[in-house]
Image (cartoon, rainbow, N blue to C red):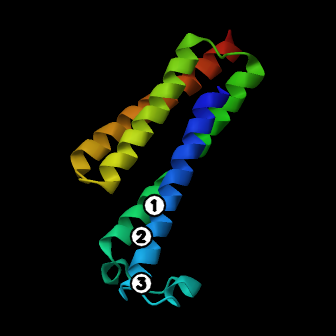
Amino acid sequence: MIYPMAAMVLLTFAVALTMLRARIRAVKQHQVPLGYFKTYHLPPDQLPEAMVLTQRCYNNLLEIPPLFYAACLAAMVTGLTGPTMLLLAWLYVGLRALQAIIHLTRNKVIWRMRVFLLSNVCLVGMWILLVLQQAF
């Protein structure tokens, strides 16, 4: 389970780096003053789209994935690291990576939403397996 977690961490850092590059580019092109980053006091409609997209994508990777990390750790502690749990974990990571790619490239909302929902089905499946293991 450590490898899917490590892959998720790598994805998060990759998006963070993409976000940093978008911010640096925005400052260098005088689209955003450097002082903006002291208070983040500009409405999103006054920011470059690349900055908003990368920030939102990064935030997405900090919202629900903690439940993934918790499920992976719980699986490791309880010994529920068999093929089904591992498959669900890798599917979750792959789908979240695909969602990030969609978000940062073509940003087709309907596809992004479908991939997001599928990733959450995997995560719910992980938690169902964990609960069922404890119940029986």
Give the residue drawn at x 36%, y 84%: 29
Between disc 2 and disc 3, the foreground one is 3
Is 95 or 20 nearer to us in this picture?
20
Kindly report the distance in space between the C-alpha atoms of the residues bearing marks 2 and 1: 6 Å
Q: Are marks 2 and 1 in contact (CB under 8 Å)?
A: yes
**SS at circle 3:** helix
Q: Residue 7, position in %: x, y?
A: 56, 37
- 6 lies left or right of 105: right
Q: In the rendered view, tell whether residue 62 sits above or below residue 133.
A: below
Q: Which residue is mark 1?
A: 18
Give the residue drawn at x 62%, y 37%: 6
Give the residue drawn at x 41%, y 62%: 54
Q: Quadrant of residue 2?
A: top right
Kindly report the distance in space between the C-alpha atoms of the residues bearing marks 1 and 3: 15 Å
* Residue 52 image label: none
Q: Amino acid at mark 3?
A: Lys
Q: Which residue is mark 3?
A: 28
Q: Quadrant of residue 81?
A: top right
